[in-house]
Amino acid sequence: MKSRSAESLLRALSGVYLRRAIVVSLVVGTILNLINQWDAYFGVAPIAWTRLLLTYCVPFCVATYGAHSAFQGDARDRSSN
């Protein structure tokens, strides 16, 4: 039997929730990369590839964690009723 936490995480990483996390990552990550690496895109500085990739990973993780936390809360609410 899977733990409630594992079930919530699998649910957060599937279907509409996964697509939403990817969209959030692309939109927010692009905005943050433009802010953080403006000189690399439009100037003379080199692109920091590790920073670029991490800047997309952070909003993905935040969106996924938000969905996971919401599912955890729903599960607690249902078990207390």
Image (spheres, rainbow, N blue to C red):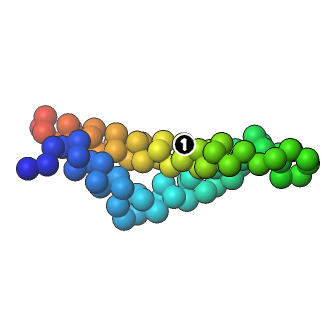
Please say whether residue 38 is visible from this viewpoint.
yes
The residue drawn where x is 20% and y is 38% is 77
Q: Residue at x 34, y 44 (%)?
A: 68
> In screen coordinates, is 57 left or right of 66?
right
Instruction: Decide if residue 62 is on the left or right side of residue 8.
Output: right
Query: Residue at 64% across / 55% down in the picture?
Result: 27
Write down the quadrant of residue 4 in the picture.
top left
Find residue 9 and report its horizontal and vertical position in percent.
30, 48
Q: Quadrant of residue 54?
A: top right
Q: Tell me the quadrant of the picture where the C terminus can be found.
A: top left
Asked if one can make out residue 28 in the rendered structure from this viewpoint, the answer is no
Residue 30, how many percent across, how many down?
A: 69, 53
Percent coordinates x, y for residue 39 in the rendering: 86, 44
Which residue ends up furthest to the right in the rendered image? 43
Residue at numbered disc 1: 58
Question: Vertical placement of 41 versus 80: above or below?
Answer: below
Kindly identify the amino acid type of the residue bearing the numbered disc 1: Val
| Viewer-closest of 51 and 1 | 51
Q: Position of residue 75 (x, y in %)?
A: 21, 42
Residue 81 in the figure: left or right of residue 33:
left
